[in-house]
Image (spheres, helix red, strand yellow):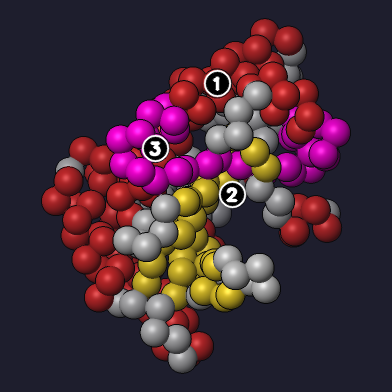
Amino acid sequence: MRFRHPDGSTVHLAYCTNVHPAETLDGVLAQLRDHCEPVRRRLGRDRLGIGLWLAKDAAHALVTDPAALRGLRTELDRRGLEVVTLNGFPYEGFGAEQVKYRVYKPDWTDPDRLSHTTDLARLLAALLPDDVTEGTISTLPLAWRAPFDAPRAAAARSALTVLAQRLDALTELTGRSIRVGLEPEPGCTVETTADAIAPLSAVGHDRIGLCVDTCHLAT
């Protein structure tokens, strides 16, 4: 949903789809039909923003098939939904019976995390509403705290630097500004504001910031 801030800017409130299991594109489409559209109708709104979670397989299907991406956008429009942000934290298996530490894999020392997040940025740029030029993606806070030595920290910073460069290029290509936020979480390398200072300062780019999850903050 969209709200008008006192300063005149638009604030987006989104319904996050990662609460519903879906590993494939068909599963994502079922989420829109079975959960997101009914929520919009119950709220009595013409449009509902959603924070879309695209697992590895679903994201790959959309990146490699332009027709599938157009079909998803058409389905969103048909159901009165709009994508304003992506949850890029879970990679796959988030609806499994046991998730636990698997949710932190691959972490930012693994090239698969960079590749997946790059795909998500390309998809979000294509899915944003026509009148929206900025989007955000949340991601895991680098890695689980142990083991995370100096070489792994350097690898994570290097990956985020490459990501920032790719996001710059995406803006030049599409006119859409996509930012990625590390989501601090207990037990991870970035758990507090103080933990975030070093990696963000090392990257030194406004494309990479923080996603403040109030549930994690309360924990």
Q: Secondary structure at mark 3?
A: helix
The answer for how far apart the CA atoms under marks 3 and 1 are is: 16 Å
Of the image marks 1 and 2, the number of the one nearer the N terminus: 2
**Do we see residue 35 in this rendering?**
no
Which contiguous range is marked in magenta?
Answer: 166-195
The reply to whether callout 3 and callout 1 are in contact (CB within 8 Å) is no
Location of residue 77 with respect to 63 vertically, above or below: below
The one nearer the camera, 122 or 15, is 122
Q: Nearer the viewer, residue 14 or 32?
A: 14
Q: Position of residue 12 (x, y in %)?
A: 54, 67
User: Residue at point 45% right, 86% down?
Assistant: 45
Circle 1 sits in a helix, a strand or a loop, which is it? helix
Label 3 to label 2: alpha-carbon separation: 38 Å
Which picture quadrant has residue 146? top right
In the picture, which quadrant includes the C terminus?
Answer: bottom right
The residue that disc 2 covers is: 98
Marked residue nearer the N-terminal end (3 or 1)? 1
Residue of label 1:
161
